[in-house]
Image (cartoon, rainbow, N blue to C red):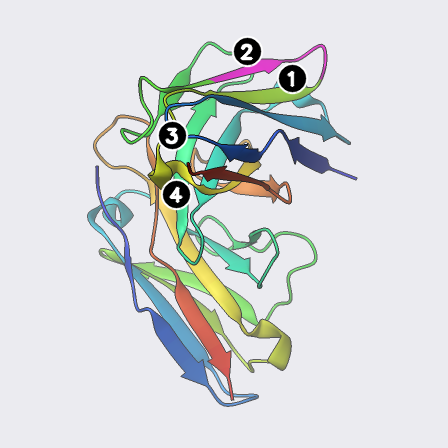
Amino acid sequence: EVQLVESGGGLVKPGGSLRLSCAASGFTFSSYSMNWVRQAPGKGLEWVSSISSSSSYIYYADSVKGRFTISRDNAKNSLYLQMNSLRAEDTAVYYCARRSGRELHEFDYWGQGTLVTVSS
Amino acid sequence: SSELTQDPAVSVALGQTVRITCQGDSLRSYYASWYQQKPGQAPVLVIYGKNNRPSGIPDRFSGSSSGNTASLTITGAQAEDEADYYCNSRDSSGNHFVVFGGGTKLTVL
């Protein structure tokens, strides 16, 4: 059974940093591109970042470029999101999602999410 | 980056058919994927590609596309289909971005 479990969320002050993790199991993690998608309270889904299976290709939404860094450790079956210079508008539930292997935008499995709150 | 536009809310009587639409320039080049999200839960992929359902998704869910509009149709809506539905697609500008629609809240009456 495919499982994605996020962790690392919490309360952080504006300008602070946080590192999210996503532990994957039930599939060959090293064969799949992975993504982070966020959802602000009461709002819609927003794609944040993607990373290819071997970390060769990395992309960011304009809203986080230069502040967030996506990475992965295939030996540990883990995906990460380092978030720096956090702003109030980064407050959201952050989901990790697996790209299906077909189209770039097909996310076939999602974690349950971890809440990041940026507030003083 | 391109945008995807969805109606904020749609309602359907129990057992009837409802269509949820998604409009955007990128849909002229790429099929939309559709996700169902119930309160407090993670999104679930329900339709991908031309009209494909992942394992476990009921066959009352179907997808179609024409021009710049993608549609998700639920034929014989059930109470458990009440949820938020999001479309997404690849950005058409060639920069490998992914875009989501704003979501449609489906109410089953």
Which residue is the site of mark 3?
A: A14
Residue name at image x 34 percent, y 40 percent = A89
Q: How far is the residue under mark 2 from the one under mark 1?
A: 7 Å
Q: Which of marks 3 and 2 is in front?
A: 3
Measured as percent of width and height from the top left, residue B17 is found at 47, 82
Q: Is mark 1 on a helix, strand or loop?
A: helix
B68 above or below A96?
Answer: below
Residue name at image x 59 percent, y 51 percent = B42
Q: Do the residues labelled 2 and 1 touch (CB within 8 Å)?
A: yes
Q: Does the magenta stretch include residue B25?
A: no
Residue range highlighted in magenta: A70-76
Disc 3 residue type (three-letter): Pro
* Quadrant in which the C terminus of chain A appears: top left
Which residue is the site of mark 2?
A: A54
Q: What element carries label 2?
A: loop
Q: Are marks 4 and 3 on the same chain?
A: yes
| Residue A1 found in image quarter | top right
Residue A46 bears which disc, if any?
4
Q: How far is the residue under mark 2 from the one under mark 4?
A: 24 Å
* Nearer to the camera, A108 or B101: B101
Q: How far is the residue under mark 4 from the one under mark 3?
A: 20 Å
